[in-house]
Image: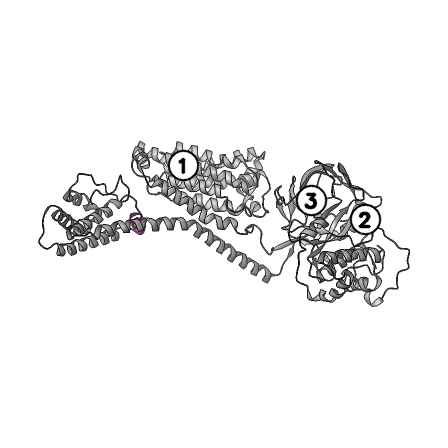
Amino acid sequence: MSDNIGLARLRIAFLFVAYTLLGAASGAIFDSFEWGLVLAPMVPTVVALAVVAQPALIRVSGAIVAILASVIVAVIIAVGTPGDVIDAFTSGVQRLLSTDWPSPLRADLIGTVAAVIATATALSEELAARRRWHLLPLLPLAITYVAVVALSAPNGVNLSWLLALAVISTFFATLRNEGSLGERLLLLRGERRLVPLIVTAGMLAAFVSVPVGMAARANPRRNEPAQRSAPLLDPIEATLALQDLDPAADLYIVGNNAEGQLPKQWRTAALESYDGERWSPSLTLRPIGHTLGPVTGPVIDVDLRIMDDNLSLVPLPGPPVLVAANIETDADRTVVRLVEPPGPDTGIAVTTNIPATREDAADIAIATREVDDDLSGLTGLAETLGGDTTTLGQLEQIEQTMRDEFVLDSAAQGGGLQRALIERFLRDTQRGNAEQFATSFVLLARSLGVDARVATGFTTPDPPVSEELTIASSDARIWPEVRLVDGRWLAFSPAPLEETSSSTPPPPEPQLQTPAAPQPPIAPPPDPTNDATPIDESPSTSETSTLSAAVTFLLQGLFVVGALLLPLVFIAALILAMKSRRRRRHLNGPAPADRIRGAWAAATDALVDAGMTIGRSATDAEIANEAEPLAATANRELHRLATLSSAATYGNPARPDLLVVDAATCLGVLETTMGAERTLWQRLRWRLSLRSLRTTTRSPVS
């Protein structure tokens, strides 16, 4: 009994190592190594080792207490509160699935992941202590690993963690919960096939993980299209309202933590959807951790201080890399917003990529898009303004022409963004406000097949600074941007540098002035937190999106299950092929006596796989007597085959060819009977048993 408990504890120890590796790998969910997740399997393992010989009620009670203790430890390490422990078991799962990757470093979310790992650990270790289960304890490990990979998207599969788990699982698979601990260790020491088995498992892990890791992975927590969308305050209206503040107010102070000059333009939002009347600011924002994107080139590290507690948008000069605050953002990182209102002089560490320059655009192509039918009428005008040159040259010529020949006038009549007013501005008046300049440039660029958008934010005056930059409300600007093929956006400035109203504007055309034309507001921007009323989409769109998401999830689940089962299927096929080859070699001897003896050898292989141990000096009759319980309804054929084997070995039968047929018939009846007397699971274990292939357990009959 003590030996069996020792073997169970050894199996539990292997599972502890596997789940500790899984805890380290789960840090990818937060893009950070978290000790609370690494230590999550420890308490369930200690409890499982202590109560392995106790009744089931004590083991289950100990596992529940251990899971709770693991979550408490993880929350304490994450500097959480008792409320975070409760949230880890209640709302933690929903919060975890509703955030963008990486998940925020919050104590309740870390506690939720720790609870999942601790629960899977306790379940696997409980199954490992039971004699009837052999490989089943690896199932919770595999399911939890798949969940960690999914929650770590778009990181994908980490090959190092997967190979390590494959090696640990291979060692665990050799520790069948039968016999004493000394026998199992002796079997491991003499098992020659262990090394090639580990190599095969590693190759299969690489075969499965490499294509998965190289594929473009979508975030499974992001529903596309979103069921609900939260509209932001219109960035254009907010920018105009900031410009109208009198006196101007200081909004941000940017401290440079590295050498070099600070960028002049700091974007707060970008708008790509234009419906012919306005730029739509509706975006789906989700909470996210500190990491927002990859480093694509030179970066700057700054300290951003927010001077007004009514501000929530974080200005950035280029694609963000890291923002050390509780934030939410959209999928394309066009808006980064603070989850909680900032305090006075709130400081935020920000790492961001340097924005693209004109020199970059000369080396990198401009990204293209299909020209919309409603914009094709502007293509001729864009080609006239841009001239016959490269795409970048056309855009620069349009920018220069608008800056030199058009007039910037914030009070221009008909200054709305309706398509008719934009056409009038471009073809007739050539006098408008800043948002008309930006919109017109974007529409002209799109009519040339260029991917462009409108951006809002701040443009600081010259000269550029290198130490500390103050951003004021008077620096609020609207400008167009063009996308490069590498994903970066290049800013243009088509509006004149100075505003003028000295010239007399042309008389307005009444038929174009409609009450629907939006006018720039003069009131301060409203509180964004009061303008986030969710907008439900149509039921048909919601149902279609849900069905599409369900089908996609089902296909992904089938792919993952297939990828996990592929190594098992390969190993099972390899075992069956080796046993089939050994059986054919037994039955295809050169002489009839060899084939009779081979039929008996095949029968003893089947008996060994069924659990029988055959001594080296056992006779054929002794083997048949000991094997009677394994084939209760085929004892006559069993003894007949043993007698034929002895006669072929020690005698000289008159008609050995007839005895070969008799031996083959007895072997067939014996194998059929042994299979019929077992359940499906028992037959599977019997067919895939390695006992007849191992040197230490196989039949001595040859």
Coloration mode? one colour
Crowding near pointer 1: few (<14 within 10 Å), some, many (20+)? some
Q: Give the tally of numbered discs.
A: 3
- At x 78%, y 54%, the residue is 494
**Residue 322 is a magenta residue:** no
User: Which of the two discs, 1 and 3, labels the residue nearer the N terminus?
Assistant: 1
Compared with 235, 29 (above or below) is above
661 left or right of 154 in image: left
Crowding near pointer 3: few (<14 within 10 Å), some, many (20+)? many
Q: Are marks 2 and 1 in contact (CB under 8 Å)?
A: no
Q: Secondary structure at mark 2?
A: helix
- Pinpoint residue 297: horizontal percent, then vertical percent: 65, 44
Q: Amino acid under label 2? A: Gln
Compute the Cα span from label 2 to label 1: 65 Å
Compute the Cα span from label 2 to label 3: 26 Å
Find residue 503 and report its image quarter.
bottom right
Q: Name the residue carrying label 1.
A: 14
Decide which of 70, 634 is in the foreground and name it.
634
Q: Which mark is residue 243?
A: 2
Decide which of 585, 215 is in the foreground and name it.
585
- Pinpoint residue 553: horizontal percent, then vertical percent: 51, 54
- At x 56%, y 51%, the residue is 218
Q: Which mark is residue 354?
A: 3
